Amino acid sequence: MKGWKKGLLAALCAALVLLAAAPASGSSAEVYLMAVNDRVLTTTAGNMPTVVGGVLYVPYTMLSSRDGSINLGVTAMYSTTRRTVMVSDDGQRGVEFDTRSNTAQDISGNPVSARAVVRNSMVLLPIDWLCQYFGTISCTRTQTRYGTLVRVTNSAAILSDRDFVDAADNLLADSLRTYLSTVNGEGEEPTPSAGVQPTAQPSGAELFLAFRWGSESLECARALESREQRGLFLFTVGELREQGDLVRRLVGAGHTVGLALTGEDGPECLAQGSEGRELLAAAARYNALVAGAGALDEEGREALSQAGYVVWVPTVQGNGWSTGRALVRGLSLRRVNYVELECGPGSAALLREALRAMAEENCQIYQATAPALS
């Protein structure tokens, strides 16, 4: 055991000599390692946190909703089409960072003072500002012999910072080695952890998925969950009266539940929406914020928006395709796709095939929450 420790210390000393000779990738020569709750994340020259003007910025992937092992309650989704990052929580708060215009705004369109930065093609976010804005996450810095550990946590974190550093000593050493192997192109950059999108890899289509209630709604939800995805499930008022158990199951699994409004004008849809919200609140203590209203014109949709709804407008009807692969081939690469499927007979099989094809084509699936759709 003593010999092993000596070997590790010798390797670390050599690594630190290499680090001293390597130019810094950010505004500071210090190495920043990363952790979320009780998990150490992979640090590379392309995603290391950095300090700019005294502000600590971390890669948006620390909050990535695509990583099933990260569940902070505050998630970040990057749109390669719009070059924006949407950061939102499970409630009604969210901030969109636009890297092209160097601006940021909340989901109501009000400008905020925070800004994102881009380094090595990675979008980095001002983590302390986000912690203060949402109030449910926190960020600490802990000095270790491998570098400064930046740790983002919520109430689910088990270990204190010091106990975590002691328990994760070997993992932090590995993280430093990984970082050093990527500095100045020395060695190949390791495969990112699940949910971290390689910035140099061609991106497939971007899309949101929504489902109209049907006999295979539960099977569709399970297909999504098996891929660590969540969708938007839309119910009419009549369906909500009969599907309380399913609604509770969907809400409990983290899916978005919305209203399918069938009225032909704004007042009729608003009346349905009010009743639907009451039913959802009674069934699952859930506040419906997303509504689909296919019969409404622009004026009617604006009335829904003024009443606090985010209006779901599909651009792709999934059941119009013969196979899931055909559906994926038909998705646009130039804009975000809003895909809607009816959960009737055969829809679960079509969805499973489509999800496999989406994974193969490197598609980015975003959960259709109200902040993400705003």
Image (tube, rainbow, N blue to C red):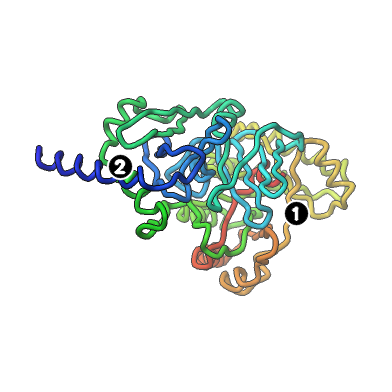
Residue identifier under label 1: 313
Look at 61% across and 44% down and name the residue there: 256
How far apart are the alpha carbons under marks 2 and 1?
Answer: 54 Å
- Please state which amino acid type lies under the numbered disc 1: Val
Residue 300 drawn above or below residue 133:
below
Q: Residue 15 at what x, y percent from top left? A: 29, 45
Q: Residue 249 at what x, y percent from top left? A: 53, 42
> Split into 4 quadrants, where in the image is the C terminus?
top right
Using residue 219 as the reference point, say whether residue 369 is left or right of it: right
Q: Which one is earlier in the sequence, the residue at label 2 or at label 1?
A: 2
Residue 339 drawn above or below residue 300:
below
Residue identifier under label 2: 16
Residue 4 visible in the shown view: yes
| Label 2 crowd bin: few (<14), some (14–19), many (20+), radius 10 Å | some
Look at 69% across and 47% down and name the residue there: 373
Look at 57% across and 57% down and name the residue there: 364
Using residue 165 as the reference point, say whether residue 94 is left or right of it: right
* Nearest to the observer: residue 164 or residue 280: 164
